Amino acid sequence: MIKRYYAQKYIEIGSALVLTTVLATGVGGVDIASAEGAPGAPPVRPGAPHLVLPRGPAHLGASRIGAGFNPTVGRLEYDDPVTHEHGLCTGAVVRSNNRNLVLTAGHCMSEGGKSRKYQNFKFRPGATTNDPAPFGVFEGFRANSVKQWGKKGDLRYDFGFVNVKPNQQGQRLGDAVGENGIIVNQSYVAPRTVISYLGALLVQKECFGETRPFLPPPESRVRINCDLPPGSSGGPWLKDYDAGTHLGLANGVISRVAADRSYNLSPYFDDAIWAQYQRSATY
């Protein structure tokens, strides 16, 4: 049974997250640089605009994927230990020390507000109908979201990371397909490319548009007028996406879909996800 995510499922919760200061030097082995918001756009949220650069694959195998597919975006599978349902989401590879990190939505990792974590994660980068595992299957060994999602179901923190093991051939994920970068504390209004799978279909869809605030802060989410449907949760929102290298800077993730599919929502990527990224990137 496929578990689908519907926009009506979760309620709004108005608490704020307070984290200890995170050093701007980043995790070991990861390059950090500064970044600025778009001129003339609304101001960025408080906090340093941290940036981690993308990194290409160690092998040329990533180029063999069919046209129109991004090898760093994949199908994320998981099981609900209570309902025994099999869930499907989208995930995207992001740069980490051990080249093993997948970004996705928090509700693809746990039942928000119930402290119930899913299990048996499997990531299939670049999955297609003709080849569901062109780069192998990468099993998750650690999945973690912030407590504001896991314990409270706060949609402003509907993001998380999954660390995965090497595939059956012993390849690390980032070596096999490359790794997107990540950037935080950017303008609410900016061009972004969104890529995700369409529900249970092994088909990727790409949408390019401009983000804008969903509601005024501290609601702290952004919207984009893309029509990716329910079931596409976890697809990355990429800044400066390069169609040639299939790499960009992750700055959002599909969290919610409008009932009429006229827009998608993402948490605003600020210091909360930056701190969670730094913790996850070291495993």
Image (tube, rainbow, N blue to C red):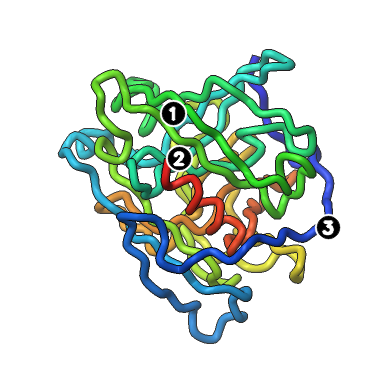
The answer to whether the residues at label 1 and label 2 have Cβ atoms under 8 Å apart is yes
Residue positioned 51% across, 25% down in the render? 121
Q: Residue furthest bottom?
A: 40
Q: Is residue 159 above or below residue 217?
A: above
* Side of 235 relative to 257 (left or right): left
Expressed as whole percent of the image width and height from the top left, the position of residue 66 reads 27, 34
- Name the residue rendered at 49%, 41% in the picture: 196
Report the front residue among 277 and 226.
277
Residue that label 3 marks: 14
Residue 29: % across, % down: 30, 55
SS at mark 1 in the image: strand
Q: Position of residue 94 (x, y in %)?
A: 40, 48
Image mark for residue 123: 1
The CA distance from mark 1 to mark 2 is 8 Å
Crowd rating for badge 3 (residues with CA inside 10 Å; few <14, some 14–19, many 20+): few
Q: Residue at x 83, y 52 (%)?
A: 13
Q: Amino acid at mark 2?
A: Val
The disc label shown at residue 71, or none:
none
Split into 4 quadrants, where in the image is the N terminus? top right
Type of residue at label 1? Answer: Phe
Of marks 1 and 3, which one's residue comes earlier in the chain?
3
Circles 1 and 3: CB atoms closer than 8 Å: no
Residue ID for mark 2: 102
Helix, strand or loop at label 2? It is: strand
114 versus 250 height, above or below: above
Q: Is residue 164 shown above or below 2?
A: below
Q: CA distance from mark 3 to mark 2?
A: 27 Å
Kind of residue at badge 3: Gly
